[in-house]
Image (cartoon, rainbow, N blue to C red):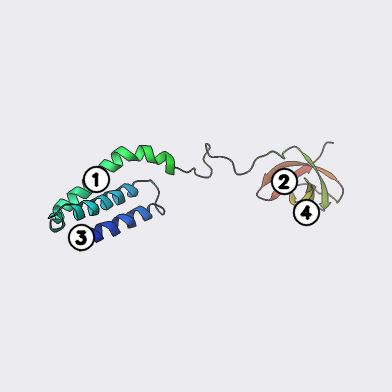
Amino acid sequence: MGISEIIWLVLGLGLILSEFALPGFVIFFFGTGALLTGLLTWLIPGLGSNLLLQIILWLGTSALSLGFLRKKLSSVFKGTLLGDSKAPQLESDADSGQTATVVQDISPEKAGRISLHGTTWTAKSFDEHFQKGETVEILKKEGMTYWVTRSLI
């Protein structure tokens, strides 16, 4: 195996690995083209000494793999962006509207704690004060913190 084959193989692996850091799922196919060029340079005698032909072969195999495989493979490697309306939500508002018991005073200036589902959670209020023992209604959940209001029950 000559130096040009090794260079193409290393370049191909580097391009494929760089796809993890760069979005778009395009560089992968240039890496695939480089791997194919390295393989063909090793298999076809005389190709290792013709750099122009190697570059043309690399561009051609990259374009063919990009054209024929990207659509099929992109669904396998596709992720979802956070905040995308089609992405699954990280949190649900399943607790919204439920009631909980205050176990540590809550005020707009200072978060307190509520008891819900057998454990305690941090709770905040926009403009109301709650004392230990009061019942509150959950408005929403942000991270590990519940926003609460006065319960009508």
Q: Mark 4 points at which residue?
A: 112
Is the residue marked by circle 4 packed among few (<14), some (14-19), or many (20+) residues within 10 Å?
Answer: many
Q: What element carries label 4?
A: strand
Asked whether the beta carbons under mark 2 and mark 4 sit within 8 Å of each other, the answer is no
- Tell me the number on the disc at residue 147: 2
Q: Is residue 107 in sight in this rendering? A: no
The image quadrant that residue 96 belongs to is: top right
Three-letter residue code for mark 2:
Trp
Q: In this view, does 91 lie to the left or right of 108?
A: left
In front: mark 3 or mark 4?
3
Q: Nearer the viewer, residue 89 or 110?
A: 89
- Quarter holding the N terminus is bottom left
Three-letter residue code for mark 1:
Thr
Q: Where is residue 25 in the image (x, y as percent from the top left)?
A: 37, 46
Q: What element carries label 2?
A: strand
Q: Name the residue under label 1.
A: 61
For marks 2 and 4, the one nearer the N-term is 4
Cα distance between the residues tagged 2 and 1? 56 Å
In front: mark 3 or mark 2?
3
Which residue of the protein is positioned furthest toward the right in this rendering? 133
For marks 3 and 2, the one nearer the N-term is 3
Residue at 30% x, 54% y: name it: 12
- Quarter holding the C terminus is top right
Q: Where is residue 55 in the image (x, y as percent from the top left)?
A: 19, 52
Asked whether the beta carbons under mark 3 and mark 2 sit within 8 Å of each other, the answer is no
- Tell me the number on the disc at residue 13: none
- Tell me the number on the disc at residue 4: 3
Asked whether the beta carbons under mark 3 and mark 4 sit within 8 Å of each other, the answer is no
Cα distance between the residues tagged 3 and 4? 67 Å
Q: Is mark 1 on a helix, strand or loop?
A: helix
